[in-house]
Image (cartoon, rainbow, N blue to C red):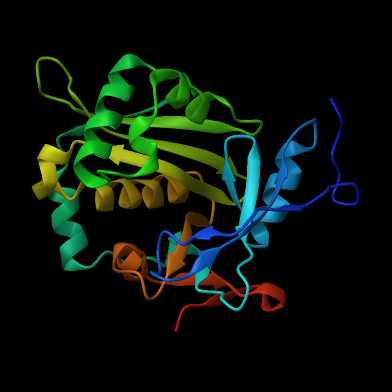
């Protein structure tokens, strides 16, 4: 397998497609493959420059005339939970947390399908088979884990949420997460982020990477609530979100 270095990495550009966040816009992505012994170091370097991993690819939006998608990360050690966040933590203090290898299970897949059918009906991921899910979880050339959340006191230890997470030299990158759509009152999506902040702190790391934030997209608004938040601004590097 070819051993990539920053100097030898080839970047490719996708064709234009409808933007999933902003109506009437077209999106294009700059991407490359992650492979070889230096996959982790290249992953970190490109993540520092606003790229995001999906399986063995790493990409960044490269849309003509638009830079609405901005990579964001939480400064974990400066984060102070608001009253709302403290209520979410209390409401989920009956959950157990287990960090597992990236091995797909039928239990995870069933929860994944229920989540997609409830939260993203009609989306492209709804057609994913178990094999597709298996590839999403297991096809990773970098250090990744699955974080499972279960009802600790339930007789069946019911699985209620899962986070696919990359372990970075300076923090954790939340690649994809899903949870039980019938437990909306628990705000599980928020809880998973709060738990990752706690994990980063306990590991003496610095950041929780949240992927892309689009200011004009209502579905992305929640990310701006986790302050202090830094935004990757190209040659300026990581800057505090105003």
Front-most of residues 161 and 11: 11
In the drawing, does residue 144 fall left or right of residue 133? right
Task: Residue 237 in the image: state x and y as whole percent.
Answer: 66, 73
Q: Quadrant of residue 16?
A: bottom right
Image mark count: 0
Q: Looking at this rendering, what residue extends furthest in the bottom direction?
A: 242
Q: Residue at x 79, y 37 (%)?
A: 38
Front-most of residues 57 and 142: 57
Q: Residue at x 40, y 69 (%)?
A: 22
Task: Residue 134 in the image: state x and y as whole percent.
Answer: 47, 22
Q: From the image, which quarter does the C terminus lie in?
A: bottom left
Q: Residue at x 49, y 30 (%)?
A: 136
Residue 149 visible in the shown view: no
Rendered position, 201 above or below 182: below
Front-most of residues 45 and 68: 68
Q: Residue at x 46, y 25 (%)?
A: 132
Front-most of residues 98 and 131: 131
Rendered position, 190 above or below 109: below
In the drawing, does residue 139 fall left or right of residue 195? right
Q: From the image, which quarter does the N terminus lie in?
A: top right
Residue 31 visible in the shown view: yes
In the drawing, does residue 26 fall left or right of residue 196? right
Task: Residue 104 in the image: state x and y as whole percent.
Answer: 42, 19
Rendered position, 51 above or below 38: below
Task: Residue 158 in the image: state x and y as whole percent.
Answer: 17, 22
In the drawing, does residue 154 fall left or right of residue 69? left
């Amino acid at each position: 397998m070819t051993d990539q270095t920053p100097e030898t990495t080839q970047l490719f550009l996708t064709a234009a497609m409808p933007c999933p966040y902003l109506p009437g816009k077209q999106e294009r992505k700059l991407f490359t493959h992650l492979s070889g012994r230096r996959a982790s170091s290249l992953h970190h370097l490109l993540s520092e420059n606003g790229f995001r991993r999906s399986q063995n690819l790493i990409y960044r939006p490269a849309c003509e005339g638009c830079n609405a998608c901005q990579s964001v990360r939480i400064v974990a050690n400066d984060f102070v939970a608001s009253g709302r966040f403290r209520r979410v933590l209390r409401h989920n203090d009956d959950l157990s947390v287990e960090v597992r290898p990236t091995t797909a299970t039928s239990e995870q897949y069933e929860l994944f399908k229920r989540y997609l059918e409830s939260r993203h009906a009609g989306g492209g991921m709804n057609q994913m088979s178990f094999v597709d899910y298996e590839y999403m979880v297991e096809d990773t050339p970098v250090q990744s884990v699955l974080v499972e959340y279960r009802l600790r006191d339930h007789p069946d230890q019911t699985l209620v949420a899962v986070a696919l997470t990359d372990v970075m030299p300076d923090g954790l990158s939340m690649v994809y997460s899903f949870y039980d759509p019938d437990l909306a009152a628990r705000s599980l999506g928020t809880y998973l982020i709060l738990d990752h902040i706690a994990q980063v702190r306990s590991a003496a790391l610095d950041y929780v990477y949240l992927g892309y934030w689009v200011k004009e997209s209502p579905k992305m608004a929640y990310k701006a609530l986790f302050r202090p938040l830094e935004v990757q601004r190209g040659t300026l590097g990581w800057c505090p979100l105003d």
